Amino acid sequence: MPAPPEDLRLTEQRNPATTGIDQLSPLELVDVINAEDDKVAPAVHAERLEIARAIEIAEKALRRGGHLIYVGAGTSGRLGVLDASEMPPTYSVERTLVQGVIAGGSPALTRAIEGAEDHPEEGAAAMDQRGVTERDFVLGIAASGTTPYVHGALRRAQELGAHTGLLLCTPPPKEYLEAYDVVIAPLVGPEVVTGSTRMKAGTATKLVLNTISTGAMIRLGKTYGNLMVDLRATNRKLVDRSQRILMETLEVDRDEAAALLHRSGGSVKLAIALHLTDGDMSEARRRLDEVGGRLGEILARQGTDDR
């Protein structure tokens, strides 16, 4: 019997450490999967320069009024949509600032849409539908690196003048390195179950996307130190967190924190600025606008003025 053709994609190769997993006990399965997962963080770290480059591109896009747009299919697409959907409640940004595009549309979030990833023209059409421009950064996500939908979207985004990037978990061909502004390739190795990229590749993808979006938001002044000062208190947990941030940052009691939060419409950042301006709402907004929303600069200037 002739040998099957070799697939050069790392995500499609068999893992020699797991060829007998169907004979393992539950505890042995946990141990072998965990051992493979240990390879993910080092693989992501090896791509630190490229990830930093992606943060720089995303920050520039957002500062000039553009968007960060993820494009993927299957697990890759779902992870992009997930990361994008978490930006508004976490950092009080517009819902469209960070977007996730998945092959097959919204139905593909909860069920497989067979063949949706095979059509590059649909990826291109999605870019037109989103109104992509030269101000945007479009990051394709394709664990195998070959998803036609993703490359169709990236080519169209380039035609529209956008910056583009690709996140994959297999060694990138030279043409990808030449075609896109940034290529991020955490090489996590073959999956525990051959081709099941929702596992190590999916974990690596989640880590990378978390880092890019969080890094961009921090660079835009959405935190003060490591405090989530740009959140909006829209439920009990967030109200409590917001009040505790105000109590710690401003050294006020819970009642005063609650009053500030109420006056600011649930915005922690505005509540802090309001306190620093003795309750002058217009002055609080002016100061925030003056420093581009970077609360740390207001607090630093306040400390200088107090000396």
Image (cartoon, rainbow, N blue to C red):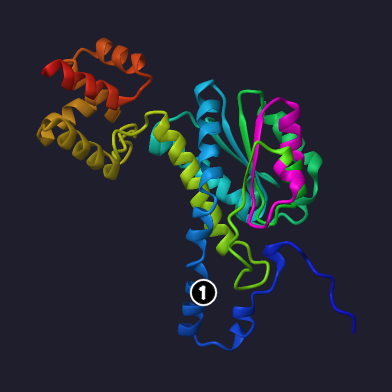
- Which three-letter amino acid code belongs to the residue tagged 1? Ile
The residue depicted at 9 percent of the width and 34 percent of the height is 253
Q: Residues within 10 Å of mark 1 (few under 14, many from 20)?
A: some
For the residue pair 81 and 207, the one nearer the viewer reads as 207
Instruction: Give the left or right position of residue 44, taking residue 132 as reference.
Output: left
* For residue 14, above or below residue 202: below
- Residue 160 lies in the magenta stretch: yes
* Number of numbered labels in the structure image: 1
* For residue 77, above or below residue 37: above
**Quarter of the C terminus within the rendering:** top left
Instruction: Give the left or right position of residue 138, taking residue 87 as reference.
Output: right
- Residue 263 lies in the magenta stretch: no
The residue depicted at 54 percent of the width and 30 percent of the height is 96
* For residue 193, above or below residue 105: below
Rendered location of residue 20, percent (x, y):
62, 85
Rendered location of residue 222, percent (x, y):
37, 31
Q: Which residues are magenta?
A: 152-177
* Label 1 residue SS: helix
**Quarter of the N terminus within the rendering:** bottom right
Instruction: Give the left or right position of residue 114, taking residue 169 as reference.
Output: right
For the residue pair 86 and 249, the one nearer the viewer reads as 249
Residue 229 in view in this figure: yes
Q: Which residue is mark 1?
A: 33
The residue depicted at 27 percent of the width and 43 percent of the height is 236
The residue depicted at 61 percent of the width and 23 percent of the height is 135
Rendered location of residue 128, percent (x, y):
72, 29
Q: Residue furthest right?
A: 1
Residue 265 in view in this figure: no
Rendered location of residue 124, percent (x, y):
76, 36
